[in-house]
Each structure stands twice: as structure tokens, then as C-alpha cells.
């Protein structure tokens, strides 16, 4: 009977997924189960002790040595398998517990990689590139090796997507990424900002070398055909170059490189331009907008307009999209299209996003908004999407003001979602779990649209204006809108058409099954404060068709 019980205990111990070793205080193994032998092989207890696995101490993560390394090699060196080991006292004996953590470690490394890399090209993303540039600007350097920033834009890339399809466009991006990586020096950091834009942080070049490298990239791209699905395609690049000499502000350097890129495109594309002080007037208009927005956040000269989103069947307003306005009284007047792209380069846009969410939450918490059931939608930048704390912060704001989360919707553009799928999924999951709405804006403007629609938990799809504008006259556009509606409806999502500017378009979109619309014909933006006092301030009656 005793022998049968011992055999049963041994079978149970061998069936446990964790390895178990019973040893003396001197390290002599008295008993072990089969799993421990499978995980550790010939590694003995003294080796665990040497690696820091102590009695009643915290669990220790260790990397086992590879088969090519001697067995007496210290644990924790490069190897093939990760384990977690702990030890507890059992009277005068010690019980070691070992679990295989290799798969957990692999998943963690993959998630870390996804957070820092562009999924399409495998290059580092904007967050990593910005961090490296910030480090560079903090290092003491002279002008001969101050480094610099390149912003690279593919000329007329939209034509490739429109004529040849997004699958070809995606492969062009991958092939070009490989070509740029092969051309750049090993010390350079190449990344993708999103869309058709790349960035390069040069860490050892002076001003002249920065421009020379930009010109080299243009020449190599123009003279090297990219073989895509068996066909040779040629692309050209426009590159803006900004030397880092003496600059300490990352946002300013991004603005300088952007200005160089603007000059390259204005001069005819397929060329590089170096930021120069004679471009100061343009730089003031584009770069100093960062200062103006920062001051506006402090002195209250930012405003919010609200534009209605209308049910195309009932004509009722379902929600309002908030639009940021800079009303600081400074000439020249700049609109969102002028200052938001510049802010996206730095961290100030994250502060702006939180300001907008805060104002939206306060508005939704007002007695008038509670009575009317007002719902608001807010655009979110890629920088806020990348912030792992942003989603929980939004939810906390709603709870603090006792606002029903379903009355707030957040929007990210398709290009933003593409730039960091893992961050987009994390934010979407946090907001959807809390009960917020979550929209994919400008749907159709990026790559592989339906792939992202399938894999991200959106409630709403906003169809890009390029598809909507001619949906009542263009057979191709109506077919594309119909495809989006069918896909979104099948996935349980609501569709919104943007840029609805005439009555005929309303009827066409309604016939195609689009749920809602937004545009000047349906309602122009009006100040949020005015809307709070007059809910009809932005809308006009919708004709029935």
C-alpha cells in the first residue's frame, strides 16, 4: 500500500508543469521530478545557488546556457531558454521550484519590439527616433560632428496607391526602407514617421555632410528601380535636412527639417534642401507656432468649435466633433492645418490633447449637456496614442466628472493607427472597455485599410473625403464607399461620411447605406460655448430623400 502511494505521489509530481528539486543545504539533490530534468538538464543545485537563487529569497529569472556553451558557464549568459527559480525551506531541507519562462519572455520581447517599431517596414517608429534625437541634442559637440535630422518624403506616393493598389504601395515602402538602410552609414538611425514619410537622425555629420547625405539618398532612390511583384518601379524623394549645430530644442529641429522639405517640394521635388537662416520668415510662420500654441494654452486664447455629425436618415444630430482654434489675435492667423502637423513633431501636442479632453469633459458634465444628452467626439494625435497612460487618464476624467463614457468619442486617423498598431489596440481596448466610442478617421487614406479595420475594435468608421466628394457622380467612388459600408456594417460598426457639401451627395450616401454625415451642408462649425446655449447653432434641416 505504501509503495503504491509512493508511486502515485511520484506520478503526480512528474505531471506538474513546474520542476521540483528537494536538496540538502549542502546542495546535494535528494529527489527531483521529471519536469526539473527536462528544464534544467545536467545543471545541478549549486549552480542555482551561484546564480542567486537563495532560500526564502525572491524568484530569480535566469537564462540557461546554449548547447554550444560549457555546462559550467555562469547562468544568465546568452542562451536558448529562460527559467524562473525560487527556493523555500522545508525543515532542514530546501525545495527548489523551477518554471520555464521562455514563451513568456518571447512574447514580452515581441511586444517591446512592436511598441518601438513600425510594423510595415520594421524600422523604428517616431517615438524612438525622437528619443534618439533628444539624446543627440543633449550631447556636447562641435559643429564638425553635431549631427542632424533628415525628413524624407516619397514624391507622389498617393499615385502609386491609387493606380497600382495599396499592396504595391506597402511593398514599395518595404523596399525603399531596405534601400535607405543600405545607403546610410551604420551610425545613422532610420525610422518611419508614418504615411510616406521617413526620418533619419545623423549622429556624426556636420552641416555640409548632412546635406550631402540627403542628396545621396535622393540620387540613389532615383537611380535604383524597386522590384515589386516582378515589376520595376522608380520613385523619387524630397528631403529636408537640418543640422543640429547649436540647437537644443527637438521641436525646433523638426520644424527646420520640415521647412527644408517644404523648400525641396516647392523647387520641384526629387531633391534635397538644407534649412538655412535666409528661410527665417517661413520658419517664423511654421516653427514659432509651437510657441504661440504653448502660450495660448497658458493664457486661454485657444478655443473649441463644434461641428455636427448628422444621421442621414432622420436628420438628427448624433454628436459633435470638436475642432481646435487658435484665437490669440496674432498675425498671421493660423488654422489647425497649419499648426497641428508641427505640434505632432513634439510633446506639446500631448498637452493640447489633454486640454481638449478636459474641456470636452467639463462641457459634458454641465447641466445643459446632461439634459440634452449632448455627445462629443475628439481627435487624438499619434503622440497621445503612443502614451500608455493616456487611455486610463481619459477614463479617470469621465469618472471624476460623473460623465457617462458613451457620450465621449475619440478619433484617430488611419495613418495614426498604422504608425503603432499595438498602441492603437491598447487605447481602443481601454476606451471600449470603459464604454467610450472609438472612431477610425480618414478611412481609406492609409495602407491595407481593411486589415486594420478587422484587427482594431472601433465603433465607427469615418470614410475619407477623397472617396466621398464625388460619390454621387463617380461610379468608382460609389463602389468604394459601398465596399466600406458593407465591411463596416458586417463588423458591427457605424459609418460616417466626411466632407458632405451638397444635397445630392446626401441622397447618394443615404442610398449607399452610409449611416451618418459631416460637412458644411449638414452644419458648419460653431463655438462650443455657443452650442451649449443654443443646440441648433450649427445645424440646418436635412432634406428627406
Image: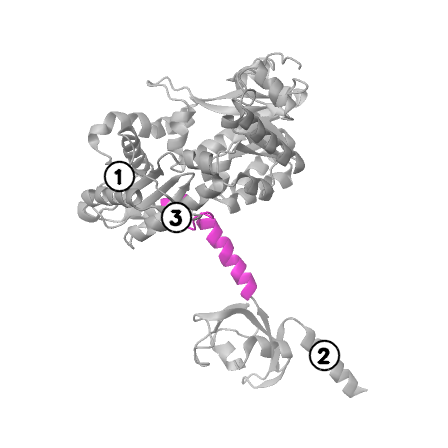
Whether residue 445 appears in magenta in the rendering, the answer is: no
The first of marks 3 and 2 along the sequence is 2
Q: At 65% from the left edge and 17% from the top edge, which residue is drawn?
A: 315
Q: Is residue 405 left or right of residue 7?
A: left
Residue 11, numbered circle: 2
Q: Is residue 244 left or right of residue 92?
A: left
Q: Quadrant of residue 156?
A: top left
Camera-nearest label, 1 or 2? 1
Quadrant into which the N terminus falls? bottom right
The first of marks 1 and 2 along the sequence is 2
Q: At 59% from the left edge and 70% from the top edge, which residue is drawn?
A: 99
Pointers 1 and 2 in contact (C-beta within 8 Å): no
Look at the image and tell me whether residue 140 can be seen. Answer: yes
Q: Position of residue 186 (x, y in %)?
A: 29, 55
Whether residue 113 appears in magenta in the rendering, the answer is: yes
Mark 3 surroundings within 10 Å by alpha-carbon count, few (fewer than 14), some (14 through 19), many (20 or more): few
Q: At 56% from the left edge and 71% from the top edge, which residue is drawn?
A: 85
Task: Tell me the chief SS of the magenta region.
Answer: helix
Closer to us: 164 or 248 = 164
Residue 24, numbered circle: none
Closer to us: 217 or 228 = 228
Most extreme residue toward the right, as rendered? 1
* Residue identifier under label 1: 242
* Residue identifier under label 3: 227
- What element does badge 2 sit on? helix
Mark 2 surroundings within 10 Å by alpha-carbon count, few (fewer than 14), some (14 through 19), many (20 or more): few
Q: Which residues are magenta?
A: 102-130
Q: Quadrant of residue 87?
A: bottom right
Q: CA distance from mark 3 to mark 2?
A: 59 Å
Closer to us: 1 or 309 = 309
Q: CA distance from mark 1 to mark 3?
A: 31 Å
Amino acid at each position: 500500500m505504501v509503495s503504491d502511494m509512493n508511486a502515485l505521489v511520484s506520478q503526480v509530481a512528474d505531471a506538474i508543469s513546474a520542476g521540483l528539486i528537494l536538496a540538502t543545504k549542502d546542495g546535494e539533490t535528494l529527489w527531483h521530478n521529471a519536469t526539473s530534468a527536462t528544464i534544467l538538464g545536467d545543471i545541478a543545485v549549486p549552480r542555482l545557488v551561484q546564480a542567486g537563487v537563495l532560500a526564502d529569497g525572491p524568484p530569480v529569472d535566469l537564462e540557461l546556457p546554449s548547447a554550444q556553451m560549457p555546462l559550467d558557464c555562469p547562468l544568465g549568459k546568452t542562451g536558448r531558454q529562460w527559467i524562473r527559480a525560487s527556493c523555500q525551506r522545508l525543515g532542514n531541507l530546501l525545495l527548489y521550484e523551477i518554471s520555464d519562462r521562455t514563451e513568456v519572455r518571447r512574447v514580452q520581447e515581441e511586444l517591446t519590439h512592436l511598441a518601438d517599431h513600425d510594423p510595415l517596414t520594421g524600422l523604428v517608429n517616431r517615438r524612438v527616433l525622437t528619443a534618439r534625437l533628444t539624446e543627440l541634442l543633449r550631447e556636447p559637440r562641435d559643429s564638425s560632428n553635431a549631427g542632424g535630422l533628415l525628413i524624407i518624403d516619397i514624391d507622389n506616393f498617393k499615385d502609386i496607391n491609387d493606380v497600382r493598389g495599396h499592396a504595391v504601395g506597402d511593398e514599395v515602402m518595404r523596399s525603399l526602407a531596405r534601400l535607405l538602410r543600405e545607403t546610410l552609414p551604420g551610425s545613422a538611425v532610420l525610422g518611419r514617421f508614418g504615411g510616406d514619410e521617413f526620418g533619419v537622425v545623423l549622429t556624426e555629420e556636420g552641416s555640409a555632410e548632412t546635406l550631402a547625405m540627403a542628396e545621396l539618398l535622393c540620387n540613389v532612390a532615383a537611380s535604383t528601380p524597386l522590384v515589386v511583384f516582378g515589376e520595376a518601379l522608380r520613385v523619387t524623394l524630397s528631403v529636408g535636412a537640418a543640422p543640429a549645430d547649436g540647437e537644443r530644442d527637438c521641436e525646433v529641429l523638426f520644424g527646420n527639417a520640415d521647412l527644408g522639405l517644404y523648400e525641396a517640394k516647392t523647387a520641384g521635388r526629387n531633391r534635397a534642401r538644407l534649412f538655412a537662416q535666409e528661410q527665417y520668415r517661413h520658419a517664423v510662420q511654421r516653427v514659432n507656432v509651437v510657441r504661440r500654441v504653448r502660450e495660448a494654452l497658458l493664457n486661454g486664447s485657444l478655443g473649441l468649435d463644434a461641428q455636427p455629425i448628422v444621421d442621414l436618415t432622420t436628420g438628427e444630430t448624433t454628436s459633435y466633433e470638436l475642432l481646435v482654434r487658435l484665437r490669440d489675435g496674432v498675425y498671421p492667423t493660423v488654422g489647425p492645418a497649419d499648426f497641428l502637423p508641427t505640434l505632432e513633431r513634439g510633446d506639446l501636442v500631448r498637452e493640447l490633447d489633454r486640454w481638449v479632453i478636459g474641456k470636452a469633459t467639463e462641457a459634458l458634465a454641465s447641466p445643459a449637456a446632461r439634459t440634452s444628452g449632448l455627445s462629443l467626439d475628439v481627435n487624438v494625435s499619434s503622440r497621445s496614442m503612443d502614451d500608455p497612460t493616456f487611455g486610463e487618464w481619459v477614463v479617470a476624467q469621465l469618472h471624476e466628472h460623473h460623465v457617462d463614457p458613451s457620450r465621449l468619442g475619440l478619433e484617430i486617423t488611419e495613418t495614426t493607427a498604422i504608425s503603432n498598431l499595438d498602441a492603437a489596440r491598447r487605447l481602443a481596448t481601454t476606451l471600449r472597455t470603459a464604454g467610450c466610442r472609438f472612431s477610425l478617421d480618414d478611412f481609406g487614406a492609409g495602407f491595407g485599410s481593411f486589415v486594420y479595420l478587422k484587427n482594431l475594435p472601433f465603433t465607427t468608421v469615418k470614410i475619407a473625403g477623397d472617396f466621398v466628394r464625388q460619390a454621387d457622380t463617380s461610379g468608382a467612388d460609389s463602389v468604394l464607399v459601398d465596399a466600406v459600408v458593407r465591411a463596416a456594417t458586417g463588423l458591427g460598426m457605424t459609418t460616417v461620411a466626411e466632407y458632405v457639401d451638397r444635397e445630392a451627395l446626401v441622397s447618394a450616401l443615404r442610398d449607399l447605406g452610409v449611416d451618418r454625415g459631416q460637412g458644411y451642408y449638414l452644419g458648419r462649425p460653431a463655438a462650443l460655448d455657443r452650442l451649449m446655449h443654443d443646440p441648433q447653432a450649427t445645424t440646418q434641416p436635412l432634406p428627406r430623400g
